[in-house]
Image (spheres, rainbow, N blue to C red):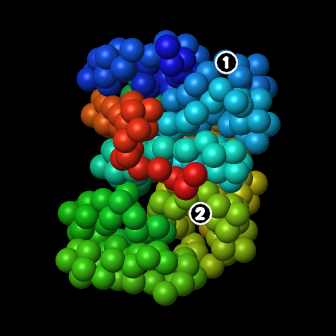
Amino acid sequence: MTRVLLTTTSFQDTPGAHQQLLEKAGFEIVRERGPLPESRMLELAGSFDAFICGDDAITRAVIEKSLPRLKVISKYGIGLDKIDVKSATEFKIPVLFTPGVNHTTVAEHAFTLLLALEKNLIFAVDATRQGQWKRKTGHELLGKSIGIIGLGRIGKEVAIRARAFGMEPIGFDIYWDEAFAKQYQVRRANTMDEIFASSDYITLHTNLTPETRDMINAKTIAKMKKGVIVLNCARGEIVHTSDMVEALKSGQVAGYGTDVLDQEPPPADHPLLKQPNCIVTPHVGSRTFESVVRQASCAVENLTLYLAGKKPHAQANQV
């Protein structure tokens, strides 16, 4: 029997069709509560034919120890930065993933963060729960510009919703979809500096790569409008934490809404958790019942298709 390590908590905790798909596949399933650090993955490695993983640390060492038994890695989600895809390719281990399953959910979450910041939602809720009737004046989104860094599936959904709010979307992406931009009147920025200089809000929807790591730092923040709001539903490491903290304290950045951090889960003394103009959610941007079922079903289907010698929905590497 094929033995599979399943680590994603949202997969395990959410009822839906994916549970029946997994049961029907007939695998022996071992469940762990991820995301798992490299140390735990190394303890488990070597006794599984496949992983259905989330943001677990699947390093070269983990892959090496998993051989020769490991046949395939099926990622639940789209971000591959926690998987050493290069090493997996070298050892001929296919890495499957699930693009196109969570763009609606993540785009909605970006606006959840933005509205919470601009309407002072956390302050108002906390005050009324404490029996106080304190009020702060907020801001409308109407007429504001929103710079979207990364106009892929999620970035496009953000642009569509921005238009619905009466906002001006400005996009930056190496791969530009002219037809989409024309349909939704997305102004193209030729450089990120144009985004920084022009946007009232900036939202990040790009992969974590060596080029994007610490992309939002003291130097780039200085190029932004004073009082900008920055949103991050991509990866925490795209934003340099200490530089963002200083910008929040100085007022250069009026608010930072993020679903991701450079350490997850964060230590109790993580500096962003102490900033009153920062909202942090625990990496739940894609965690809705609808999105979980789509992601999990696709991850299971990818795995079963590959093991049956058929083409999976999406593969990140060529082996």
Numbered mark located on residue 253 in the image: 2
The residue shown at (44%, 32%) is 307
Circle 2 residues within 10 Å: few <14, some 14–19, many ≥20: many
Residue contact between numbered discs 2 and 1, judged by CB atoms under 8 Å: no
The residue shown at (34%, 51%) is 100
Circle 1 residues within 10 Å: few <14, some 14–19, many ≥20: some
Number of residue marks = 2
Q: Nearer the viewer, residue 62 or 106?
A: 62
Please say if 118 is above or below 202: above
Numbered mark located on residue 47 in the image: 1
Q: CA distance from mark 2 to mark 1?
A: 48 Å
Please say if 159 is above or below 81: below
The residue shown at (73%, 40%) is 59
Mark 2 or 1, nearer chain start: 1
Q: Is residue 248 left or right of residue 1?
A: right
Q: Nearer the viewer, residue 14 or 43?
A: 43
Residue type beneath disc 2: Val
Residue 31 visible to the viewer: no
Please say if 28 is above or below 294: above
